[in-house]
Image (tube, helix red, strand yellow):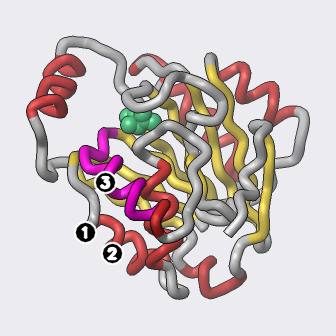
């Protein structure tokens, strides 16, 4: 496998056609999984008014990008260090993400077309990997046609990362989230929802996810 995730923060890649489109968006909330002490501490910090990240998703008749950006604006009050979106259109997945304020993302979006009526967006508060363009969400699989946004922490990500690397996957970010994109890729056999279910069985921690392909 080779990595086609662009080094810049703009990019699009081909999706897998209609069968994938049927389950293009799988938004799953799975808070309440196994929690370690550090995770509990993090949650306590958040209750105390610390920044929290946010996820937004859209599927419908309208262009997704402005709706996602608007949704992310509404989540700004929670605090974040970077933001990004992934939008699906006719076999292509467009991923745009940037470190820093939402204006940075908006600037990038204004410079290119990000068409499509299905998408996910994220504001990140880094737990694994510094705030940077490449560590921003969405995180993708190597071919860039599965994108994941994630709130929370994957406690066993190091084990999963090594396991995936042993299977030939290579990583571009320092996030725990990237293992999810590769795991969904690993399990995907034409049914995104099933691939996400199989992936969830491997994850320890607590998390909310948006997955698109
Ligand atoms: N643990 C993930 C990361 O560091 C998600 C952080 C968040 O909840 O925004 O990228």
Q: Position of residue 23 (x, y in %)?
A: 52, 76
State yes or no: Cβ of the residue under disc 2 lies below 8 Å from any atom of ligand 1.
no
Residue 61 is at least partly visible in this image: no
Q: Quadrant of residue 82?
A: top right
- The crowding category of the residue bearing disc 2, from other C-alpha atoms within 10 Å (few below 14, some 14 to 19, many at least 20), is some
Q: Which residue is mark 3?
A: 159
Q: Quadrant of residue 19?
A: bottom right
State yes or no: Cβ of the residue under disc 1 lies below 8 Å from any atom of ligand 1.
no
Residue 187, placed above or below residue 183: below
Q: Which residue is mark 1?
A: 201
Q: Tell whether label 2 touches label 1 (CB within 8 Å).
A: yes
Q: Position of residue 173 (x, y in %)?
A: 56, 40
Please state if 109 lies on the left or on the right of 28 as rendered.
right
Q: Nearer the viewer, residue 122 or 153?
A: 153
Q: Which residue is mark 2?
A: 198
Q: Nearer the viewer, residue 6 or 68?
A: 6
């Amino acid at each position: 496998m080779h990595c086609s995730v662009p080094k810049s923060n703009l990019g699009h890649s081909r999706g897998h056609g209609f069968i994938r489109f049927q389950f293009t968006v799988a938004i799953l909330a799975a808070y309440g999984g196994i929690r370690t002490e550090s995770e509990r501490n993090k949650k306590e910090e958040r209750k105390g008014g610390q920044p929290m990240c946010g996820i937004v998703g859209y599927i419908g008749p309208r262009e997704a990008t402005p709706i996602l950006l608007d949704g992310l604006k509404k989540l700004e009050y929670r605090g974040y260090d970077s933001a990004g979106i992934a939008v699906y259109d006719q076999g292509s997945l467009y991923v745009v993400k940037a470190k820093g304020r939402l204006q940075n993302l908006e600037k990038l979006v204004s410079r290119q077309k990000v068409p499509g009526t299905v998408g996910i967006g994220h504001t990140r508060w880094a737990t694994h990997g510094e705030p940077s363009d490449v560590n921003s969400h969405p995180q993708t699989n190597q071919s860039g046609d599965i994108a994941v946004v994630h709130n929370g922490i994957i406690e066993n990500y190091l084990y999963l990362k090594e396991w995936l690397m042993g299977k030939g996957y290579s990583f571009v970010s320092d996030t725990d989230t990237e293992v999810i994109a590769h795991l969904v890729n690993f399990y995907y056999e034409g049914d995104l929802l099933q691939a996400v279910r199989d992936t969830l069985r491997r994850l320890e921690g607590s998390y909310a996810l948006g997955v698109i392909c």
